[in-house]
Amino acid sequence: MINHNYKLAAAMIGTLALTGCQLTNYKPLPHVQSRLDIYQPVTLSADLSHLSQNQKKMVSLLIDAADVMDDLFWKQSYGEDKTTFLSRIPDPKVRQFAQINYGPWDRLDNERPFLKGIPTKRPGAEFYPKEMTKDEFSIAGLSDKKGLYSLVRYDENGKLKTIPYAMAYGPELKKAANLLRQAADLAEDRDFKKYLNMRANALLLNQYQPSDFAWMSMKTNPVDVVIGPIETYEDQLFGYRAGFEAYVLIKDQRWSKKLAKYAKQLPSLQRGLPVPSQYKQEKPGTNADLGAYDVVYYAGHSNAGGKTIAINLPNDEEVQLKEGTRRLQLKNAMRAKFDHILKPIADELIVPEQRNHITFNAFFANTMFHEVAHGLGIKNTINGNGTVRQALREHASALEEGKADILGLYMVSQLLKKGVIREGQLEDYYTTFLAGIFRSVRFGASSAHGKANMVRFNYFKEAEAFTRAPNGQYRVNMKKMKQAINDLSRLILTLQGDGSYAKVDQLFAEDGNIGPLLKEDLARLSKANIPVDITFIQGKEQLGL
């Protein structure tokens, strides 16, 4: 246990140091110059002509509410005032890079600092005290120890306590709630109006489950918003606490109708999972909604570093078991990544005779079935160790992303066999998936998605699911790929069901890293000036609002 007086002194020194640094500009580290152009600028726009004037005003208000989430995530991620921090970076390109990363750490380079004088990023970000140790937290008697929606701080006696987000961020959340209520007054869809009002209450009461259930009931609203503290990826210390984010969305009704049939397949796919019955005993919700959207605004966690192109929510296990989830495919963002990144990667790293299997249809489907596959498997361990998320702690998100990737491919193969999917052939999905691994691995191996990608890549390599030619180009072995998919699916589902923290920790330690040969191949992509990800030119002006 750290001495209380030491904690107070450390806090005072930190404050004085910060005050003293206000006059000092941040200078970039030498390596950052090669990183400044890794993001391809993309304008986020959508056709709003079918929306009424009230609906357009509603979109504008939702963007304002999203901006509040953006400011809150800066506080959770970095801590120092955003405006002050950015004003201390004279170089405009470095400043823009810091804006994209929501702080001085490169999110697509294993959170490496890119400014001089910046320490290594703390795994717990700003969710926990800087001086707190893991052991200290483990023995603390906190009622909200694993709470998604609270900060951990020291009280006046030097003991750990939790502070609900509704209290810690009271003024900001009140502002966001008022904006959501104003948007609700303009909503023409009854269910969406109800959701906006309930979500406003959730921000103020720190109780999000009722609004999650309300969000699940929406089916026909042309405008949508995902807003609040949602994903726990930023908490790399324990994976308990959620970061604020928002998406403002316009539904593509025509594409959504095409996708509706797939969600109905979940129960039969669950029964067919390649694991013993106890690892698939839960029944996935059948009220799942699968839809295509144009995203018109990202904010907070969703906008930091690499950009999300599909959403699977809510994360609440009880809501998932009762109602399923909604899977939202962000079509315009997905298309931008395919055109600017995936296709050029395939031209560089996939053998010429398999490049015809790289298709947007397969990329869209692989991404979509990744989100659908989150609904498969189990949410609770089979041996009474609580939920999978609680048992696997900071590794839960990475293993869950790995599960969704691999079971997405399992779903594609099963649905092609059944004739439910009629577009393309299995070679399209497997080859596009391999090219997609190279795209995602460039995000680094520190994030949940990055660790999942590396475990999968190394597993496929050992199983000879692909081969690498001397010129550094890759070829999919269809037969061995199919077997590797089944074997890795079985491994991940078993680890989740058993809640095997030690085994998962070992898996990521051994296979969650980028090897030297792969580093060489990824370096070729940089030399070819292929962007790593996209960044958005977005806002009301781009939408004509």
Image (spheres, helix red, strand yellow):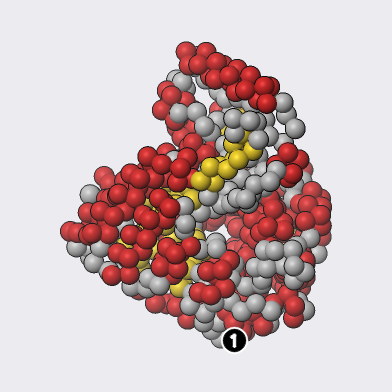
Q: Is residue 141 left or right of residue 13?
A: right
Q: Exactly how many numbered labels are in the figure?
A: 1
Q: Which residue is farthest left?
A: 53
Pick whichever, 536 or 276, lies toward us: 276
Q: Is residue 331 left or right of residue 120?
A: left
The residue at the point 53 percent across, 75 percent down is 322
Observer able to see residue 232 = no
Q: Position of residue 136 (x, y in %)?
A: 73, 38
Name above or below for residue 462 compared with residue 340. Answer: below
Q: The N terminus lies in which quarter of the figure?
A: top right
Q: Position of residue 30 (x, y in %)?
A: 60, 23
Observer able to see residue 247 = yes
Amino acid tagged 1:
Lys
Q: Position of residue 509 (x, y in %)?
A: 79, 48
Q: Position of residue 282 (x, y in %)?
A: 65, 77
The residue at the point 32 percent across, 65 percent down is 194
Disc 1 residue crowd, few under 14, some 14–19, many 20+, Cα 10 Å: few
- The residue carrying mark 1 is 418
Q: Quadrant of residue 161?
A: top right
Q: Is residue 353 left or right of residue 22?
A: right
Q: Quadrant of residue 460?
A: bottom right
The residue at the point 79 percent across, 60 percent down is 500
The residue at the point 23 percent across, 56 percent down is 56
Q: Which residue is farthest bottom?
A: 418
Q: Quadrant of residue 397?
A: bottom right
SS for dot 1: helix
Pick whichever, 165 or 355, lies toward us: 165
